[in-house]
Image (cartoon, coloured by chain):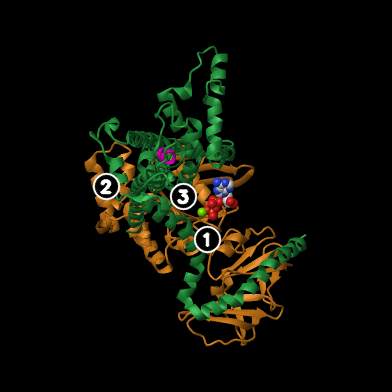
Amino acid sequence: MAALPAKLGVVVTAPLVLLARAVDPPLRWWQRMAGQGGMAAVFLLPNLAIFGVFVLFPLALNFVYSTTAGTDILLQGRSFVGGAQYARLLECRDYLDPLTCREDTFWTAAANTLVFVVLQVTMMVVVSTITALILNREIRARGFFRAVFFFPVLLSPVVVGLIWRWILQRQGLLNLVMVSLGLEPEVWLNDRTYAFAATIGVSVWAHMGFYTLILLAGLQAIPKDLYEAAEMDGTRPARVFWRITLPLLGPNLAVVLVLALIRGVQIFDEVYVLTGGGPGTSTLYLTQYIYEVGFASVLRNPGLAAAASILMGLVLVVLTLCQLWLSRRGEAKGAK
Amino acid sequence: MGRITLNDIRKRFGTTEVIHGVDLEVGEGELVVFVGPSGCGKSTLLRLIAGLDQPTSGTIEIDGRDVTRVSAADRGLAMVFQSYALYPHMTVQQNLSFGLQNTKMARDEVGRRVSEAARMLEIEPLLERRPTQLSGGQRQRVAIGRAIVREPAAFLLDEPLSNLDAELRVTMRAELAQLHDRLTTTMIYVTHDQVEAMTLADRIVVLRHGRIEQVATPLDLFNRPANLFVAGFIGAPNMNLFTATAQDGQAALPGGLAVPVPRNGPCTIGIRPQHLHPAEADASALEGRVTLVEALGTETVVHFRTADGTDVITVMAGQPGIRLGDTIRLAPDPGQIHLFDADGDRMDNNV
Ligand SMILES: Nc1ncnc2c1ncn2[C@@H]1O[C@H](COP(=O)(O)OP(=O)(O)O)[C@@H](O)[C@H]1O
Ligand SMILES: [Mg+2]
């Protein structure tokens, strides 16, 4: 029995061995030429090139676009306007009322995004923490439930949007159930409050599995005997949670918080499919605003969209710096 | 305070029973050590006493009160974990006071107990540090301090020194012994290290496969091991064991040495390496060629092989100048021969 897997192993690794033999001489030659330090650059270069072409270059290009005006998509057909696009976005008579701004949709989208992010992230952290706490206990069919909660993460956001539209639309599953129970059907996606709540609920449903997994890993990293020591001392469960579990879960919670914030600000696909930003502009978020201004509207304005995306990018940079600062602080505390 | 009684304790995990009916009485203020090879059920037994696990059957009493169904917190015991189990996000001070604050104890009292324990363990300068900022020995002290502040009826310690380096282990061992003398609280101490057991214990409980093999004072265990397992487990280097068949009240050791045996039949003769001495020139003796010499300075451990291929170990005082390949002739002290019957149980040769 043991001989077969061994032979199989040889067959599987043979091509790899051949490949390794083939690339070995040129790599050796390269190392002689470039030295130890230069070799690192050689290995990093391919990835760096891809990153440059698809991330850094577009970033710079986007900034250039944000300083131009016109409807033409090619740079040659566009005129340089300096900071005019930014000025247009930021021009308001009363900064407390989006409707007095020149680009009132931008401000509406920004305000919507702010409320969405605050509510969604709060809900995300609370729900995924509770789920992780439950899944961490010795419950029956634990593996099954872990899979169930993680499953939506594997779905494409568009599929998520479609599933929930199918459930929530006027002739959808939910109304069907309500009618069969003798209740009045409700126009869920055509009601400003319900639609807004739906975008929060659906995005939490779609992403919480990922955050639950991070928190579950954190919970499992807490040594069992800390809980046993607490048990010997007669610590009440609530006190165990607040004084032991929560502080030790802190680094994981910080990661979850910031990742959820960043992804919350970027929300687009599910919502676009589910509500399309409506009714009216009640679920219009920043990414959709940028997309519509830049590509989808009749009078498209790539310059304005580019400027808006740069402003949004700045917010994301600040959030990312917060994350780095939090994780550094966590490390420093552990090392002290 | 601190009398612990186990009555026919059994513990099953799933379908495998790991503790097979243990009866034990630990007296007030006694330091009892559970010793035995890894996996013999020492930790399990300790956790049953602590209340962290429930026995499948049997009862546990503390000071005459049946606590079998009483929660860990209400048994009035304190445990020191092998990993120390200090709360990493709390300072030493907070670690020491956390357990007391559960019990609505007055602040003054908490402070008094913490500072007294800190003084006793000489960790006062460390009170504001976190566990990660402490050395292994310092963490160990904090873990013990956390047990002391509870002023428990008994301390339960599960291999408390196993994470320390050899030198520190010796120091901490001595400190633990002093601490027990000072506190006079009952302690149950788990270890797989027989030296720790011998040096610390008032009484030693030798466990194997979830059963008690023998309960005795350290010297009784050394001088009168109840069976082959205890004989082989206690004492370093291990006791020399020779299998033989007794006839006409005599059993023969390799080399023709005859030992009186009360009963005929197969038996095992045990002689500690320390109890072999150079034989008279014409008397019968264990004779063999030296295969290994371990010179430790104060004593020398000599391994030799007899003509029939039996390996024997002896310990000689000082530096006797024996070399590899030498032939040596040794005879046991007549009063220091242990006899075991076919089941491995001790036979009394004095009878
Ligand atoms: N929670 C558990 N589940 C199943 N088996 C266990 C559990 N705890 C201990 N055991 C088994 O019980 C036996 C005794 O373990 P333990 O008391 O930890 O040994 P020791 O502390 O003497 O090394 C071992 O065979 C171990 O595998
Ligand atoms: Mg153990």
Label 2: which secondary element: helix
Disc number for residue A249:
none
Label 1: which secondary element: helix
Q: CA distance from mark 3 to mark 2?
A: 32 Å
Q: Are marks 3 and 1 on the same chain?
A: no
Q: Which residue is mark 2?
A: B113
Residues under numbered marks 2 and 1 in contact, where contact means CB atoms less than 8 Å apart: no
Q: Position of residue B81 (x, y in %)?
A: 43, 52
Specify the subunit that label 1 lies on: B
Does B253 appear in magenta?
no
Q: Earlier in the sequence, mark 2 or mark 1?
A: 2
Label 2 sits on what residue type? Answer: Arg
Label 3: which secondary element: loop
Q: Which residue is mark 1?
A: B221
- What residue is rendered at 55% in x and 86% in y? B322
- What residue is rendered at 37% in x and 65% in y? B171
For the C terminus of chain A, the image quarter is bottom left
Give the colour of chain B.
orange
Instruction: Kindly report the secondary structure that dominates the magenta region of the rendered protein.
Output: helix
Residue A38 seen by the camera: yes
What segment carries the magenta color? A289-293
- The 10 Å Cα crowd at callout 3, few under 14, some 14 to 19, many 20 or more, is few
Give the colour of chain A.
green
Q: Position of residue A323 (x, y in %)?
A: 36, 50
- What residue is rendered at 52% in x and 88% in y? B321
Specify the subunit that label 2 lies on: B
Residues under numbered marks 3 and 1 in contact, where contact means CB atoms less than 8 Å apart: no
Does A291 appear in magenta?
yes
For the N terminus of chain A, the image quarter is bottom right
Q: Which residue is mark 3?
A: A221
Q: CA distance from mark 2 to mark 1?
A: 38 Å
Q: Nearer the viewer, mark 2 or mark 1?
A: 2
